[in-house]
Image (cartoon, helix red, strand yellow):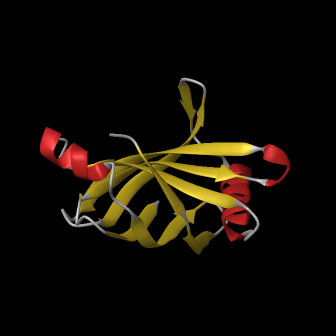
Amino acid sequence: MRLYVNAVSKQHIGYTPDMLCINGKKGVRKDYDIQGDDDFDNDGLNCRVKGDLFIAHEDDYYEMDDNQIEELVKLLQDKENEIIITIYPVDDSDENLELVSEDELTNCSATLCIANSKQEFEVRFEFKTECYA
């Protein structure tokens, strides 16, 4: 899995992604933990992650099978779903955390490249952010 995440930070704060959350139709929410090696900038949310997505359920994480990967792709393609990427600041100093509360991220877009045993998928999508500082 490769995930490319981009957003502009009004306060020029660097962030890294933590979870991919999808609020679907009928109030169903799916959470995916982003795990792997990330390469990020210290200005905004400009990050490349190479690793895995795991289904997050309560305090456990589960690997995805072929059907679950296809379901994720369909959820990301459905424009009616709300997609959120939870983030946290790269610099967690007290001074920076004060700026985080005033920050605003715009132009939030991402590309997910993921494969199952049958095929490879590349999905582009827009998202909102939730910051945990």
Residue 22 lies left or right of residue 109; in this view the side is right
- Residue in the image at 67% along x and 44% along y: 30
Identify the residue at the far top of this view.
59
Q: Nearer the viewer, residue 16 or 101?
A: 101
Residue 122 picture quarter: bottom right
Residue 39 lies left or right of residue 85; in this view the side is left
- Residue in the image at 39% along x and 71% along y: 6
Residue 113 at x, y = what percent?
A: 51, 68
Residue 55 picture quarter: top right
Q: Exactly how many numbered labels are in the figure? A: 0
Residue 95 at x, y = what percent?
A: 13, 45
Q: Nearer the viewer, residue 36 or 66?
A: 36
Residue 119 at x, y = what percent?
A: 64, 69
- Residue in the image at 38% along x and 70% along y: 7
Identify the residue at the far right of this view.
26
Residue 38 at x, y = what percent?
A: 29, 56
Q: Nearer the viewer, residue 32 or 16?
A: 16
Residue 124 visible in the current orientation: yes
Compared with residue 93, is residue 81 higher up or lower down, i.e. above or below?
below
Residue 55 lies left or right of residue 98; in this view the side is right
Compared with residue 108, is residue 90 higher up or lower down, i.e. above or below?
above
Residue 54 lies left or right of residue 93; in this view the side is right
Q: Quadrant of the C terminus?
A: top left
Residue 93 visible in the current orientation: no
- Residue in the image at 86% along x and 48% along y: 26
